[in-house]
Amino acid sequence: MKTLKTYAAWQREREVSATEFTRVKKGYCPEEVEKEIRRLEQKIGEQERELTAYRDRQDQIHKDAVEAKIKADLIVEEAQRKADRLQKEAVEELRSIRSEALGMRDLIEAFQNEYNQLLRQYLIKIRTDEFSALMDRLGSLIDKTGGDHQSKEE
C-alpha cells in the first residue's frame, strides 16, 4: 500500500537529512552516525505507515458502522411498513368478516321471524276454521263406529 507522506513527516525527514555535523577528530564515526540516521528515518517511516494504516482502518470501521446503521434503519423501516400493511389488511379482513357475520345474523333473524309468523298464522287458522271442522268430523266418525264406549268383547 503506497502512502503519502504527511507534511510533518516530510519536514522531519528534511530536517534530519539537512542536519550537518562538524567533523572532528574526537567524536563518533561519521559512517555509523549516517547509518543510525538512516535506520531512524526508516523506523520513523515504518511507524508513520503503521499510523496511516491504523487511521485508514479506523476510517473504514467508522464507514462500516455508518453503513450498518443505515442498513439497520432501512430494515427497521421496512419491517414497520410491513407491520403497518399487515395490520391494515387484518383490520380490513376483520371488518369484512364482521360485516358478513352481521348479514348472516340478519338473514337468520328474518327467517326466524317469517317462520314464527307462518306458524302463528297456521295455528290460528287451525284453531278457528279447520280445527272445529276436523273435530266435528272426527266426532261423527267415532259416533258411526260405536261411540266413545266400545264393548270389551271386541
Image (cartoon, helix red, strand yellow):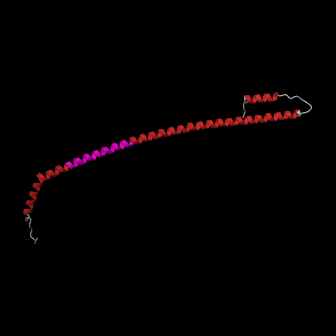
x 83%, y 35%: residue: 36
**Residue furthest toward the bottom?**
153
Residue 65 placement: quadrant: top right
Q: In the figure, is residue 132 to the left or right of 12?
A: left
In the picture, which quadrant includes the C terminus? bottom left
- Point out residue 123 in the picture as x, y percentages from the top left corner: 16, 52
Is residue 112 within the magenta segment?
yes
Left or right, residue 29 beside residue 128: right
Indicate the position of residue 58 as horizontal and vertical percent values.
66, 37
Residue 145: x percent and y percent?
A: 8, 64
How would you classify the magenta stretch by its main secondary structure? helix
Q: Position of residue 113 (x, y in %)?
A: 23, 47
Give 52 or 108, whichever is nearer the viewer: 52
Whether the magenta-drawn stretch holds residue 102 is answered as yes
Q: Residue at x 19, y 49 (%)?
A: 118
Q: From the viewer's perspective, is residue 137 above or below residue 35?
A: below
View extreme (right): residue? 25
Q: Residue 113 vs residue 75: left or right?
A: left
Q: In the image as oriented, which residue stretches furthest toward the front? A: 26
Q: Quadrant of residue 5?
A: top right
128 and 130: which is toward the camera: 128
Q: Quadrant of the N terminus?
A: top right
Start-end of magenta stretch: 93-117
Q: Report the side of 72 relative to 119 (left or right).
A: right
Residue located 57% across and 38% down the image: 69
